[in-house]
Amino acid sequence: PHILTLHGPNLNLLGRREPQHYGQSTLAQIDAALQAQAQTWGWKLRCLQSNAEHELVDAVQAAAEQGVDYLIINPAAFTHTSVALRDALSAVAIPFIEVHLSNIHAREPFRRHSYFSDLAQGSIVGLGPDGYTLALEAIRRRLSA
Ligand code: DQA
């Protein structure tokens, strides 16, 4: 299997960005944990972070041509704003799991709505970096079911 992990805007700052919400782990550490897990299964896993909406849209479109089987995505602030990224995921119809480090339901009201949750196979929120590895484990179970 071929997995693509997408991280939205400002997630490059993880580790020093509002640690009370997002914890101490860096994005490099999160990606390394996913890579390690994927490697033990012999899976291909790629990670991309972008602050630019169009780059994430392009990556989703390209994923279809690259034969990506599953996406893990934390759209970050685009969660609450981006019809364009939602439409891209809808267009390619690659199954995906939505991850948020923080519990978006326990913060400002504007974070409660996600343009992605109804399309996602599932959403994991509030569990910090574990959300990503739990998402990968959920994908493993689904692909072997
Ligand atoms: C986030 C939650 C979003 O509301 C926020 O804009 C982020 C990160 C999270 O992982 O908790 O940038 O997606």
Image (spheres, grey):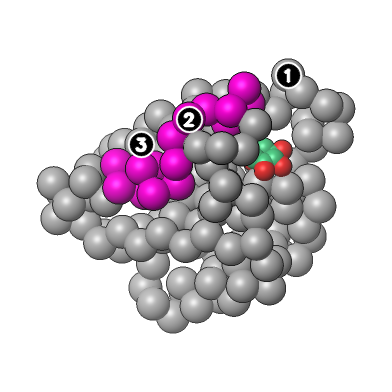
Instruction: Please name whichever residue, 55 or 120, is drawn nearer the observer in this view of the structure.
Output: 55
Q: CA distance from mark 1 to mark 2?
A: 19 Å
Circle 3 SS class: helix
Looking at the image, the residue that sits furthest to the front is: 16
Instruction: Please name whichever residue, 72 or 130, is drawn nearer the observer in this view of the structure.
Output: 130
Residue plotted at (78% across, 31% down) = 112
User: Can residue 56 be found in the magenta stretch?
Assistant: no
Residue plotted at (65% across, 31% down) = 18
| Residue on which disc 3 sits | 133
User: Dot 1, how many residues are within 10 Å of its Cα: few (below 14), some (14-19), or many (20+)?
Assistant: few
Q: Position of residue 33 (x, y in %)?
A: 29, 42
Ligand 1 closer than 8 Å to label 2 CB = no
| Residue on which disc 1 sits | 106
Q: CA distance from mark 2 to mark 3?
A: 16 Å
Callouts 3 and 1 close, C-beta under 8 Å? no
**Residue 38 left/right relative to 47:** left
Q: Position of residue 17 (x, y in %)?
A: 61, 38
Give the quarter of the figure containing the N terminus.
Answer: bottom left
| Residue on which disc 2 sits | 24
Residue plotted at (17% across, 52% down) = 39
Dot placed on the residue nearer the N-terminal end, 1 or 2: 2
Residue plotted at (65% across, 62% down) = 51
Residue span colored magenta: 19-34
